[in-house]
Image: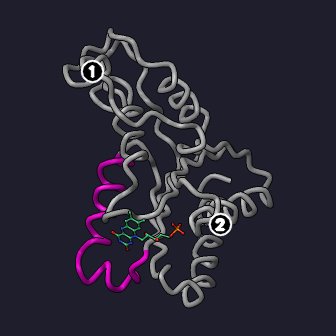
Amino acid sequence: MNTLIIYCHPSKKSYTYSILEQLQTLFAQENWQVAISDLYAMNFQSDMSEAEYEREGFAKIDLPIPADVKVEHQKLEWADCVLFVYPVWWSDCPAKLKGWFDRVYSVGYAYGHRPQMQPMKTIPFGAVICTAGHPNAFLEEIGIAQSMQTVMLEDRLGKRFEHKEMLILGGTLDLEKVRAEHQQKLKELALKIKTCCG
Ligand SMILES: Cc1cc2nc3c(=O)[nH]c(=O)nc-3n(C[C@H](O)[C@H](O)[C@H](O)COP(=O)(O)O)c2cc1C
């Protein structure tokens, strides 16, 4: 099975990085192939240029798609499972990952399909794994958990993925309270992926 992780955090000392490491361990146990788009390490360009806007904003699909975006398209076509791993920053993903969606979800590929362009394939499994300082109960109480779920699962993953899951790994301000529960959630997710497409 081919698993692509879109990972977005600037520091290897972070808790989110330890989540990435746990996923790699779980997937290695299954002998799954893993590719990682580490957006900070790649220095992924998250800003849309004016030339790109000309293409995306006006659906001029004959205009060229940048080389770095094409590479991400190739990774998506290779993947049976895609995981987005990031910390919650101001109730959303970090700007760099938002820029990945802005640029990689090209018109004619990820939406707005045209007969002259091969559309993005439907990927069997998509998962969003985000760490959050606030506990899940609080994020649910103020409606942020639901809004993040709606934006990520209904819009950004949308119909591009057959099965979709979102794990909000909250409560990281008191890490020792939640660490074991988070580890268990990751194991359960790996099992779901295996059941679905392993
Ligand atoms: C710029 C910034 C914004 C943040 N915004 C939120 C937020 O809106 N909601 C929340 O629960 N936690 C928020 N946090 C806390 C992070 O989600 C939390 O520190 C992260 O999940 C785990 O930390 P680490 O991976 O950076 O070690 C924010 C942290 C930073 C640095």
Vertical position of residue 90 compared to residue 112: above or below: below
Chief secondary structure of the magenta span? Answer: helix
Residue assigned mark 2: 18
Dot 2 beta carbon under 8 Å from ligand 1: yes
Vertical position of residue 144 compared to residue 101: above or below: below
Instruction: Measuring from the top left, give residue 11's x and y in whole percent.
Output: 58, 57
Q: Quadrant of residue 149?
A: bottom left
Q: Which residues are magenta?
A: 133-158
Residue assigned mark 1: 50
Dot 1 beta carbon under 8 Å from ligand 1: no
Q: Residue at x 69, y 66 (%)?
A: 22
Q: Residues within 10 Å of mark 1 (few under 14, many from 20)?
A: few
In the rendered structure, which amino acid carries the disc numbered 1?
A: Glu
Instruction: Measuring from the top left, give residue 80's x and y in whole percent.
Output: 60, 43
Residue 148 is inside the magenta segment: yes
Q: Of label 2 and label 1, which has the lower sequence position?
A: 2
Vertical position of residue 99 compared to residue 63: above or below: below
Q: Which is nearer the eye, 113 or 178?
A: 178
Vertical position of residue 155 compared to residue 104: above or below: below
Q: Residue at x 42, y 32 (%)?
A: 104
In the rendered structure, which amino acid carries the disc numbered 2?
A: Ser
